[in-house]
Image (cartoon, grey):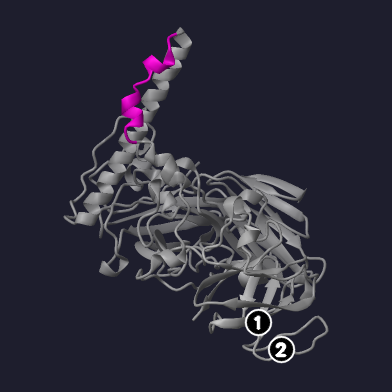
Amino acid sequence: MPTLIPHPEPEPTSQVDYHAAEGLTDAPAVEIPIEPAGEAEKRRREWMMVAVGLASLVAVLAIAVTVWALATGDDPARAVVAPAVTAEPAEQPAGAAQAAPTLADAKGVAFEPFERVDPTLPPVPAGTVKTFKVDVYQHVTQVSEALAPTEVWSFAVNGKRYQGTGVSGPMVVNEGDTVDFTLTNGSDAAMKVDLPHSLDFHSAEVNPGTRYKDLAPGDSIHYRFVAEHPGVFMYHCATQPVLMHTGAGMVGMFVVKPRNLAPVDKELWITQQEYYIGKPGGDADMAKMAAKTPDVIAFNGYADQYKQQPISVRKGEKVRMYVLNAGPSVWSAFHVIGTVFDRTMVEGMAGHDAQTINLAPSQGGWVEFTLAEEGTFPFVNHAFGDMVKGSLGVLATPHAPKAAGHGAAPAHGESATAEGGAAPAGSIAVTMGDMWIKSAAPTAKAGKVTFAVENQGAMMHGLAIVKAPAEAPGGMLDESTFLAEGGHLAAGAGETVSADLKAGEYVLVCHLAGHYAAGQKLPFKVE
């Protein structure tokens, strides 16, 4: 039987209808008194949410009328209330299709610098009662190196904030542990919270009407529960509209380890999460959320961070990866290239000898495997159209062969050819891997610029130089825009590529089909 630990604190005086909080329209809404913030920005956001809700209601009514007309044989063109649907909503598809703003579009926008997220699973807290103090903070950060920063709404767990990314940290307990939980919606002005927020535990068995209530900025709630079910669970903000809050970043992982779980050599956590970038430095784009067209689908809050800085794993180590698809809307097919999962546990179902685990939004589990050889082993969302948006990382062994793509960029002014010789004097060292580009210098002086290129990847690559922004309709580069183009380099090969470049912004790209779309690009400036 589920166990709720009694707590002496009084119950909240404001009840919440959780059906309404989760956006289910068949339940009556209960008004929740929220203190007015009195700020223009808060009013704008609240009206935006109201407008989104009304637009959705109108669209649903229009569809219902159309279906009724088709069923009764009437002309649907007369049955649909066209003005109500077409007067404004045409902007939503346009907004959903709009490309994400780039970093170049964000001039003057202050944001947090990127910091790589440690994927090592945190230990279970000490003591018989596991205490988690969770705080809400709103911050401006990038979630992809080439794209504009966006405002993300995040949860800090026991004081730990992952600034410079969009992820919220995991909470880890053992099956049967008592969880002592406090949520504060912005403990001080530094958290920059200006909206109501809440937190819904998928791992808890509690009354959502009292436990998952909306909190005004500065308010707190405290209660206890027992984590009786093992698994990888989601936690998230349940404040209306839920899509807006989860799409703006308010999701995270809660791990309940089962009793008698066998030890392994390494435990890692990976949260897949979507980001919908609006105006640089501003709110996430609600129209893109409704259309399910994320700009970024990242692991642990930042696109491709473990491709650029791989996770170290030793040959023969037993690895357990805890994986959560936090959504809010896109499915995940998690796969590690170069190995087979010896054991899987997904939503309470044990498996073995698996190539991929499939996770709907909010689902989680763990996989266990060993790496049989030295090398680099990419882990991906095997839905490749989503993978190219940032859900790609690498596990690398310490003695991975250089040709497998686990080499650091050379020092400034240095490079090597395939035979190990020195690069031409005055050239800029550029290394290419699977799927990345690194340059020993981010800028060059106008005039003839020579790049000493080395392919450190396992697959073939080739360098091209284009003006920024690169023209790549459908993800395919327009070859007519190449200012210079190298050959097709096999693993370990090198060459030099030169171009006469005027002052301006450029992009170094791999010109092989599909590699640019997979993220093989690097901004470069000529002064």
Q: Which residues are magenta?
A: 74-88
Given the image, on which type of amino acid does mark 1 rest? Thr
Q: Most prominent secondary structure in the magenta stretch? A: helix
Q: Is residue 183 left or right of residue 526?
A: left
Where does the image place residue 523, in percent across and percent down from the top left? 54, 71
Kindly check if marks 1 and 2 are in contact, taking CB atoms under 8 A apart as contact.
yes
Given the image, on which type of amino acid does mark 2 rest? Pro
Outermost residue toward the bottom?
Answer: 425
Give the residue drawn at x 31%, y 66%: 191
Examine the rendered structure and indicate whether residue 430 appears above or below residue 349: below
Q: Please state which of residues 243 and 459 is positioned toward the viewer in this rendering.
A: 459
Asked if residue 16 shows in the view, the reply is no
Examine the rendered structure and indicate whether residue 378 appears above or below residue 27: below
Give the residue drawn at x 69%, y 67%: 395
Where does the image place residue 506, in percent across and percent down from the top left? 54, 71
Q: Please state which of residues 522 and 229 is positioned toward the viewer in this rendering.
A: 522
Asked if residue 81 lies in the magenta stretch, the reply is yes
Q: Which residue is mark 2?
A: 424
Where does the image place residue 46, in percent across and percent down from the top left? 26, 47
Asked if residue 358 lies in the magenta stretch, the reply is no
Examine the rendered structure and indicate whether residue 79 appears above or below residue 309: above
Task: Give the secondary structure at mark 2.
Answer: loop
Q: Which residue is mark 1?
A: 450
Task: Tally the marks.
Answer: 2
Where does the image place residue 455, in percent across and percent down from the top left? 74, 74
Upstream in sequence: badge 1 or badge 2: 2
Give the residue drawn at x 37%, y 27%: 26
